[in-house]
Image: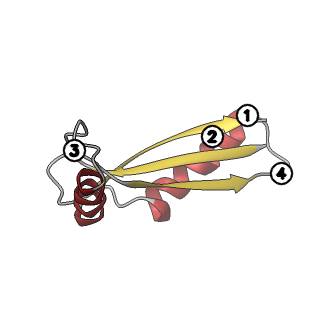
Amino acid sequence: MKALIHITLKEGILDPQGKTIHHALQTLGFTAMAEVRTGKLIEISLAGLDHGGAAAVVEEACRKLLANPVMENYSYSIVE
């Protein structure tokens, strides 16, 4: 079983990496892209847990370590 955790910056938080990518894309001619926001994907393999147990462990890990709740939003999915 795996957990796929998506972490993104909250709206209003400056995203310099997103701005750099946006600028590079415009330079390459991708002018239709109005904004780029970046984030990160964390993939964790889990063993010995059912779906509910895995979700509880991942939720706690996100709250305690993986995401900064002041600046970031997170979501996750548990996949087989």
For the residues bearing labels 1 and 2, Cβ distance under 8 angstroms: yes
Residue drawn at x 69%, y 34% as measured from the top left: 52
Residue drawn at x 36%, y 50% as measured from the top left: 8
Which residue type carries mark 3?
Glu
Residue occupied by mark 1: 51
Which residue type carries mark 4?
Ala
* Alpha carbon separation for disc pair 1 and 2: 6 Å
Residue occupied by mark 2: 55
Q: Nearer the viewer, residue 28 or 52?
A: 28
Q: How many numbered dots are placed on residues in this image? A: 4
- Check disc 2: other Cα within 10 Å, few if <14, some if 14-19, many if 20+: some
- Residue sticking out furthest to the left: 12
- Check disc 4: other Cα within 10 Å, few if <14, some if 14-19, many if 20+: few
Mark 1 residue element:
helix
* Alpha carbon separation for disc pair 2 and 4: 12 Å
Mark 4, mark 3: which one is toward the viewer?
A: 3
* Alpha carbon separation for disc pair 3 and 1: 36 Å
Which residue type carries mark 2?
Ala
- Classify the position of the N terminus by image quarter: top right
Mark 3 residue element:
loop
Residue occupied by mark 4: 47
Snapshot quadrant of residue 39: bottom left
Residue occupied by mark 3: 35
- Residue sticking out furthest to the front: 29
Residue drawn at x 77%, y 51% as measured from the top left: 46
